[in-house]
Image (tube, rainbow, N blue to C red):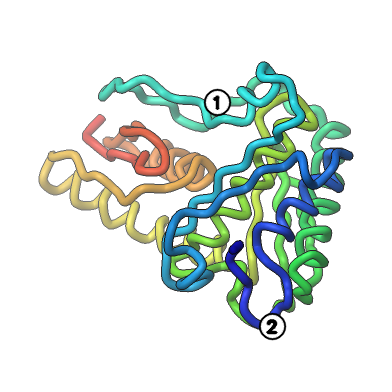
């Protein structure tokens, strides 16, 4: 039996399948979504939520594009920011933001959740914040449910626009508060590196968080930063320049 989102009258599987099918203009029966064993018991607040989505009707070559890019195990790889496939076209970014908003509205409707959307367009990405929710159902423990929603949206946008998604989802300012704490920890790490002359590893972050920390460190003399590891455990190392 599919896991039920308690108190909202819809299964998580059915809701997400319906939202994906509506966005991609395919039958919901052609979308196969599975949750890990135990997610039904603890969703949404206690378990790590990793969702696997497969569009069964899509050609194999297109389904492959939905998979996260596997990065090589290179310890010294040092991108200063997430890779951008091509220069950002403002019109394309607006179009992707509109499509992402439609996807999120469909997801909220399918889960019978309240909520409004706030869209903010930045230079190279767009941020969509879901506000006025009744509870933290879309955040989850340590933001794990929010990360699952982000991954669903990323996959849908990548499929529709055939390029890396440039949309960040936030719920009730959770990401903004988290980024503020990460920046404080990064500044403390910089002070430690300058004092002791030894590298400091920060906690795992997503690509947008890493980009913000790379920019912060780049503005400080005497230190530099690099990314290490593979998602979802990819993190930043701050070391002497």
Query: Tag 1: Cα neighbours inside 10 Å, few (<14), some, or many (≥20)?
Result: few
**Residue occupying image coordinates x 79% and y 53%:** 19
Residue 44 versus residue 121 in the image, above or below: below
Hey, which quadrant is residue 61 in on the image?
A: top right
Residue assigned mark 1: 83
Where disc 1 sits, the SS reads: loop
**Residue occupying image coordinates x 50% and y 32%:** 81
Q: Residue 117: which disc?
A: none
**Residue occupying image coordinates x 13% and y 40%:** 198
Q: Nearer the viewer, residue 83 or 122?
A: 83
Residue 195 versus residue 211 in the image, above or below: below
Hey, which quadrant is residue 138 in on the image?
A: bottom right
Image-based side of 36 in relation to 104, left or right? left
Residue 150 versus residue 211 in the image, above or below: below
Image quadrant containing the C terminus? top left
Residue assigned mark 2: 134
Q: What x and y, as percent, mark residue 91?
A: 88, 33
Image-based side of 214 in relation to 54, left or right? left
Which residue is at the far front?
Answer: 1
**Residue occupying image coordinates x 75% and y 26%:** 58
Q: Nearer the viewer, mark 1 or mark 2?
A: 2
Q: What x and y, as percent, mark residue 77?
A: 34, 22
Q: Decide: marks 1, 2 in contact (CB < 8 A)?
A: no
Compare marks 1 and 2 and give the one earlier in the sequence: 1
Report how far apart the C-alphas of labels 1 and 2 lie in the structure. 36 Å
Q: Nearer the viewer, residue 210 or 1?
A: 1
Image-based side of 63 in relation to 34, left or right? right
């Amino acid at each position: 039996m599919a896991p039920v989102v308690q108190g909202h009258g819809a299964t998580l599987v059915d809701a997400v399948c319906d939202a994906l099918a509506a966005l991609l203009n395919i039958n919901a029966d052609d979308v196969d979504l599975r949750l890990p064993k135990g997610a039904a018991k603890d969703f949404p607040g206690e378990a790590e939520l990793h969702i696997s989505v497969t569009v069964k009707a899509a050609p194999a070559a297109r389904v492959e594009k939905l998979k996260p890019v596997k990065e090589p195990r290179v310890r010294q790889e040092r991108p200063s920011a997430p890779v951008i496939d091509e220069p950002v076209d403002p019109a394309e970014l607006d179009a992707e933001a509109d499509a992402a908003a439609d996807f999120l509205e469909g997801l909220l409707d399918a889960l019978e959740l309240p909520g409004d959307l706030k869209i903010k367009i930045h230079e190279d990405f767009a941020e969509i914040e879901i506000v006025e929710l009744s509870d933290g159902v879309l955040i989850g423990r340590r933001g794990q449910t929010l990360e699952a929603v982000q991954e669903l949206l990323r996959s849908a946008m990548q499929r529709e626009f055939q390029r890396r998604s440039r949309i960040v989802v936030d719920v009730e300012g959770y990401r903004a508060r988290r980024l503020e704490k990460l920046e404080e920890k990064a500044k403390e790490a910089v002070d430690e590196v300058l004092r002791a002359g030894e590298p400091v590893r920060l906690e795992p972050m997503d690509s947008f968080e890493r980009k913000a920390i790379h920019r912060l460190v780049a503005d400080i003399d005497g230190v530099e930063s690099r990314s290490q590891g593979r998602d979802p455990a990819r993190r930043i190392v701050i070391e002497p320049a």
